[in-house]
Image (cartoon, grey):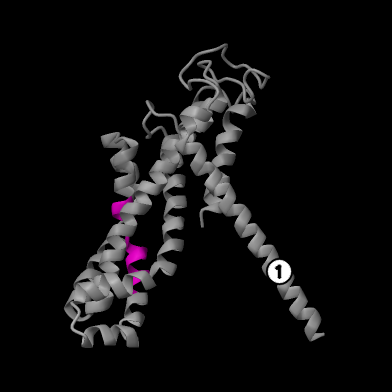
Amino acid sequence: MKGAVCSRMGEIQRGASSLSKLGAALFMLFIIMAVFSGQIAPYDPWARFEPYSPPSREHILGTNDMGNDILSELICGSRVSIVVGFGAAIMAALIGVVIGLLAGYFRGPVDEIFMGATDVFLMIPTIPLIIILAAFMRPSFWILALIMGFLWWTTMARVVRSRALQIREMNFVESARSLGFSDFHIIFSDIFPNVYNVVLPKFMLTIASAMIAEASLSFLGLGDPSMKSWGMMINFAFSRGGFLNGYWWWYLPPGLCITFVTIQAP
């Protein structure tokens, strides 16, 4: 009985490992598509052909109302969506890791000040604020990524702080202090490498959240219409008759791409 349970647990673990590898491979495929979109896309995404063409040999996913090749739009649109995700995640990680490390290591007044600021930012309704800023400023996708990162560092800071509080009491940190190393040397040479395992999952979740937010803003018409993105493709399909006329090749592919990337990112 015990052997059967162990065998079953082993099968589950192997299955989970296979799914994890498949997810990582799919996520890397999307990143490669974004980086080399100019070389992979069969046409210029702004080039015009016959509008409303169904999928064919020349246009695998058909064309939209302007005659743009949808497959080329999909490939080139991955760049904006993924850049927004990574830009927001990098910004949030930089702020959150630094604040979390300093608060967790120094404790006392430093911890109270930084965690007080974190509590203030946690009270800000981030999505409504981003919608208001996007509606009034009409920022580029770079500015949008920075705004998201500036507002979403709070959970990263809390996770890193809790881990730093644990590590600062370990023997190797005490040894570094006794040898006379400076606090900042200990923080970034001894503690920071040991918080990587909690930073990476939060980093990936921030990428997924930022991509969903960008797609949502673009769908609401608050994105940058001069840039090709998955969210803007869905917005144009909704506002220009793609949904009403059942042109699934226009709105379904970008929706599936957003779904697959955000599922695999965590």
The residue at 33%/76% (across/down) is 164
Give the residue furthest to the top. Answer: 50
Left or right: 45 with respect to 247? left
Question: What secondary structure is the stretch in magenta mostly built from?
Answer: helix
Q: Is residue 126 above or below residue 142?
A: below
The residue at 48%/16% (across/down) is 47
Along the viewing direction, whichever of 157 and 57 lies nearer the viewer: 57
Q: Residue 195 location in percent, x, y?
A: 38, 71
Secondary-structure class at tag 1: helix
Q: Residue 232 location in percent, x, y?
A: 45, 32
Q: Quadrant of residue 228?
A: top left
Q: Quadrant of residue 157?
A: bottom left
Q: Is residue 155 magenta?
A: yes
Q: Amino acid at mark 1?
A: Ile
Left or right: 64 with respect to 55? left
Q: Is residue 22 magenta?
A: no
Q: Residue 135 location in percent, x, y?
A: 31, 36
Res 129 seen here: no
Left or right: 32 with respect to 10? left
Q: Is residue 55 above or below residue 234?
A: above
Along the viewing direction, whichever of 41 and 215 lies nearer the viewer: 41
Question: Which residue in the structure is indicated by mark 1?
Answer: 12
Range of residues picked out in magenta:
149-161
Give the residue furthest to the front. Answer: 179
Left or right: 225 with respect to 124? right
Q: Residue 60 location in percent, x, y?
A: 64, 24
The residue at 29%/71% (across/down) is 189
Q: Is residue 101 above or below residue 174?
A: above
Crowd around label 1: few <14 · some 14–19 · many ≥20 (10 Å): few
